[in-house]
Amino acid sequence: MKIFIPPDTSVSGRKAAERQPLHFMTSPKTYVYVDAFNLYYGCVKGTPNKWLNIRCLCEIMLPQNQIVKIKYFTARVNARPSDPQAPIRQQVYLRALETLPNLSIVYGHFLSHVVTMPVANPVPNQPKYVEVIKTEEKGSDVNLATHLLNDAYQSKYDIAVVVSNDSDLLAPIQIVKGPLGKTIGILNPQKRPSRELLKEASFFKTIRPNTLAKAQFPKILRDAHGEIHKPSGW
């Protein structure tokens, strides 16, 4: 039995892959599940690589896989006093993603509210508590896990690839790999890999800045509604 191991897989990932016998020889049918906020805060925020073509990124990192579906899990951001244009930039980017074939966007939601929290280093005679705007993204991890498991039960893929470093996804990954007998890999957007995911994944690869730079959309795209321009400052 030959084993498919994506190129440039980490040593730990290769060992994990070698422990898992695979039942295909070439071009395994692959579904990709993108945890959008884990990806953004892990390796995109604060870089010039925000105009990211997810399909191009996957094709670069998984050159021998037949990528038949990409599911992008996110939530619509809210305007904040410090960044009132954030929802507009996000909508432009989501519109760009929708030009990609076989990509679907699955939405969770944001909760934003004011909470009182202690000051980290209080100054004498100054307030020890301050009000802050707390924003929580809800639903995306549950949505990703649900789709990952449901698609596995329906045998829609040979390989599942999760773009996240969130150890909360450990249980569904274990089920997909164990009882369901699927191969599952991780494209890690964070600097420090989750030990739990590294241990369980059939293969594990880290997303590098030079790879992100190679996977950018053109500055101008078109869809049925007209031109889509890369947001200013991106």
Image (cartoon, helix red, strand yellow):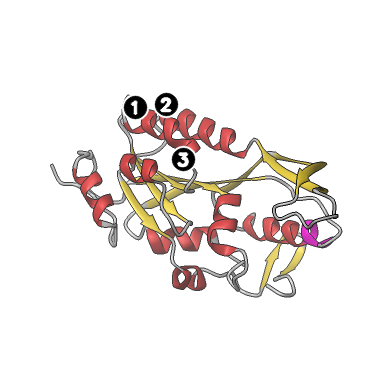
Amino acid at circle 1 = Leu
Where's the N terminus, which quadrant? top left
Which of the two labelled residues, at mark 1 and mark 2, occupies the earlier sequence position?
2
Choose top left, top right, bottom left or bottom right for residue 18.
top left
Residue 134 versus residue 226: which sits nearer the camera?
134
Q: Quick check: 205 left or right of 151?
A: left
Instruction: State the SS at label 2.
Output: helix
Q: Quick check: 232 left or right of 145?
A: right
Tell me what residue is drawn at x 51 percent, y 73 percent: 213
Badge 3 is on which residue? 167
Residue 113 visible in the current orientation: no
Q: Quick check: 23 left or right of 131?
A: left
Badge 1 is on which residue? 180
Residue 151 belongs to magenta span: no
Choose top left, top right, bottom left or bottom right for residue 106.
top right
x%, y% of residue 87? 79, 56
Amino acid at circle 2 = Tyr
Where's the C terminus, which quadrant? bottom right
Contact flag, marks 1 and 2 (Cβ < 8 Å)? yes
* Picture layout, residue 102 above or below residue 191: above
Q: Residues within 10 Å of mark 2 (few under 14, many from 20)?
A: few
Badge 2 is on which residue? 153
Amino acid at circle 3 = Ser
What distance separates the C-alpha of mark 3 from that of mark 1?
Answer: 20 Å
Magenta stretch: give its range. Answer: 83-88
x%, y% of residue 117? 76, 44
Residue 166 versus residue 34: which sits nearer the camera?
166
